[in-house]
Amino acid sequence: MTQINQLFKLAARPVGLPKRSDWSFEEATVAPPADGQILVRVTHISLDPAMRGWMNDARSYIAPVALGEVMRAGGGGEVIASRNPKFAVGDQVVGVFGVQRYALSDGKGVDKVDTSLVPLPVYIGTLGMPGMTAYFGLLDVGELQDGDTVVVSGAAGAVGSVVGQVAKIKGCKVIGIAGGADKCRYLVDELGFDAAIDYKAQDLKKALREHCPKGMNVFFDNVGGEILDSALTCLARGARIVICGAISQYNNTTAVKGPSNYLSLLVYRASMKGMVVFDYASRYGEAMREMAGWMAAGKLKSREHIVEGLETFPDALLKLFAGENTGKLVLKVG
Ligand code: NAP
């Protein structure tokens, strides 16, 4: 039977927040897999803040999406035809399949997952790229130590919620920064954070000083801008600042706001280091095994925020920038 693909291609480089006309929504006949290829029916698409950066024609850790190319996105689905000996029809897989219903792949970077253990969206969230980011960003880049006070921004999101929980599992004091009372309640009541600060309603610098009287040892930053600048006023000696992301700056039409309080790094002998999760690809297995164990033991909770309908993609992506998601934002293709 001939399948009709539906896909979003990048049509224009956005200025500020992306809009629907920055993509074209198209249909095409699905070609059968060539020798070595698999055909995947994509069921879930990962919506990630990084997708905004991939739309810019700028030098980065990965090439930009070209105009006219299918919008890049991680995701998961089912193998429905295979001419690759490593995959069989019916396999559940995750990989970078793009914003489309069907994807042909040579199998490189595609992993089989066992959906009898946890549902597929967990493999693109807590046990996927965001979870890996949290794990290696905190333990490796952040060099977490016993008894540390850890502060994480974007704390109720896919990466931040895992950062805080892993730090708690490791016996640290954890303070989350998030937007809104509901998210803050979720962090403390459901995820076991020691405290949460609503940056939209509270004086962030003051609240940080109250919760971290001796300063913070690790600041895991997902947000950048004003929040990073405020965190720099509350460091402990030897603090490690993990630059994971700067979502507050991704849609800027003016220059990125840099930290004016950076001399705190000098005063507190602190360090600030960027990370890209893909550098840890060879160690994902190690992290997945440990995190799956924590999940099975009820120590690590995973929350997915699922929206439905491929055609809603342009609006669904914006939820990340409006703070409408709690946990990992996933688009169910439908
Ligand atoms: P997420 O946190 O699940 O979703 C984004 C959240 O960011 C929103 O829910 C919102 O929460 C917050 N936000 C949006 N605009 C904001 C603003 N102007 N100021 C403050 N907060 C804002 O997203 P994620 O997938 O976990 O990604 C989190 C960060 O990690 C992003 O910066 C992303 O680029 C980065 N990341 C980096 C790597 C890497 O390898 N370096 C890998 C994955 C992700 P509130 O309601 O709390 O504002």
Image: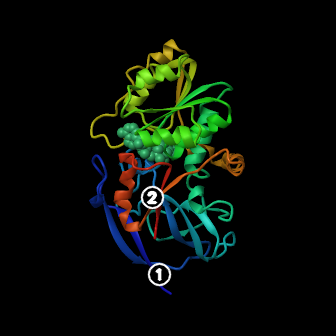
- Residue type at mark 1? Gln
Q: Which residue lies under the disc numbered 1? A: 3
- Residue type at mark 2? Arg
Residue furthest to the top: 267
* Quadrant observed for ligand 1 in the rendered image: top left
State which tag comes first along the sequence, 1 or 2: 1
Q: Residue at x 53, y 21 (%)?
A: 212
Question: At which x and y percent is residue 83?
Answer: 63, 76
Question: At which x and y percent is residue 299?
Answer: 67, 44
Image height of 233 relative to 95, above or below: above
Are dots 1 and 2 in contact, CB under 8 Å?
A: no
- Distance, label 1 to label 2, CA atoms, is 21 Å
Task: Specify whether 143 is left or right of 28.
Answer: right
Choose between 42 and 24: the one closer to the eye. Answer: 42
Question: At which x and y percent is residue 260?
Answer: 37, 21
Q: Residue at x 60, y 31 (%)?
A: 142
User: Which picture quadrant has residue 93?
Assistant: bottom right
- Determine which of the numbered discs, if any, sits on residue 72 in the image: 2
